[in-house]
Image: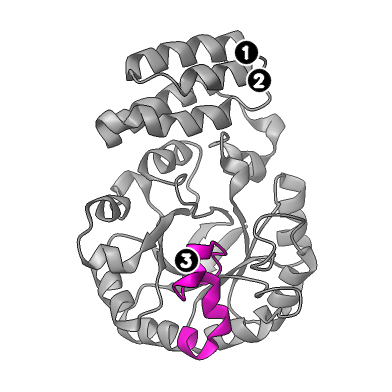
Amino acid sequence: MSLIVKNKHFNSVVLAPMAGVTDGPFREIVRQFGDNLLFTEMILAKFLIHNHGQTSQMAKITETEKPVAIQFVGNNVDVLKQATEIVKDRCDLLNINMGCPVHKIVKSGCGCALMQQPELAEKIVRSLTDCFSIPISVKIRLGWDENCKNYVDFSKRMEQAGASLIVLHARTKDQMYSGEADWKAWITLKESLSIPVVANGNITSKKEADNLIKNHGLDGVMIGRYVMGRPWALKEIEVGRDKLNFSKIQVILDHLNKLKSFYGEKAVFIARKHLAWYSVEKEGGADFRRVVNSVEDFDRLVEISKKFFEKNGMKQ
């Protein structure tokens, strides 16, 4: 099965955009397991057009990473157009975040706040699709809260404005990341639109993905938090866990090396959270995380990590 967006064919299992997770080094590690469409971290469009150093680094895409989608957050049409002009030739798909529930994003009128301003959201999408040939997609939620689930009407407006794809995280803004995603909402949305719909939320197995794609007609599934500590998760969901055969410890060590190459001296601090995710449910994991969080020498961090994961049988 493949996800088809404006005649572009992608793997139907997609990596979600996640701040602090799906950076360049992580995407490169995920890329080792297949040709899936990989999303960048959420990028603030207003920072990109002002050449903010860290934001510009986040928007860099290497040829070996592709296919890649860049996700912008913003609510100013002109700013989003300027930001798109910068990245239009770097990526395969552009995504506008209209679903982020985080307070500082919503407070600024961005993310899920745009679902309460459908006219502005429509203006953004129409402006971008009128000016650029790159496919424009939108990532949304069910709505603001249990009393305001406007995802169907909102998505129809996005489709009419020229959006080529809708990604639905099947929770409300108020739910944040708690509770279960509403799987019926994906099916309802797919039946309501003619453009592709990708399901996001609580999908952690091949069986679940196959059910949504093969039995209910969804065009793809987007995998988010399940990949934290599992950069092989997309392949796992695509082919099944029992079909995987690789050295997990080598993946972890490769990841650490890529972090060092990308971030330099800051890598030791950024690596801590990834090592914490890799060590979840491993024997001695809590002690390992306490030690890791006090290490400031990168080579020492690699040494400690190698010993810990070897002890936990992750050579294979």
Do labels 2 and 1 touch, CB within 8 Å?
Answer: yes
Of label 2 and label 1, which has the lower sequence position? Answer: 2
Residue 121 on the magenta segment: yes
Of badges 3 and 2, nearer the viewer stands 3
**Placement of 140 over or under 212, stated as above or below:** below
Q: Residue at x 29, y 47 (%)?
A: 62
- Where residue 108 appears, as percent x and y from the top left, is 44, 72
Q: Residue at x 71, y 80 (%)?
A: 148
Give the distance between the C-alpha atoms of the residues marked 3 and 2, in whole angstroms: 35 Å
Q: Is residue 313 left or right of residue 146?
A: left
**Camera-side residue of 105 and 67:** 105
The residue to which callout 2 is attached is: 282
Q: Around disc 1, counting alpha carbons within 10 Å, would you say few (fewer than 14), some (14 to 19), or many (20 or more)?
A: some
Dot 3 amino acid type: Ile
The residue to which callout 3 is attached is: 105
Mark 2 element type: loop
- Where residue 36 appears, as percent x and y from the top left, is 50, 50
**Placement of 26 over or under 224, stated as above or below:** above
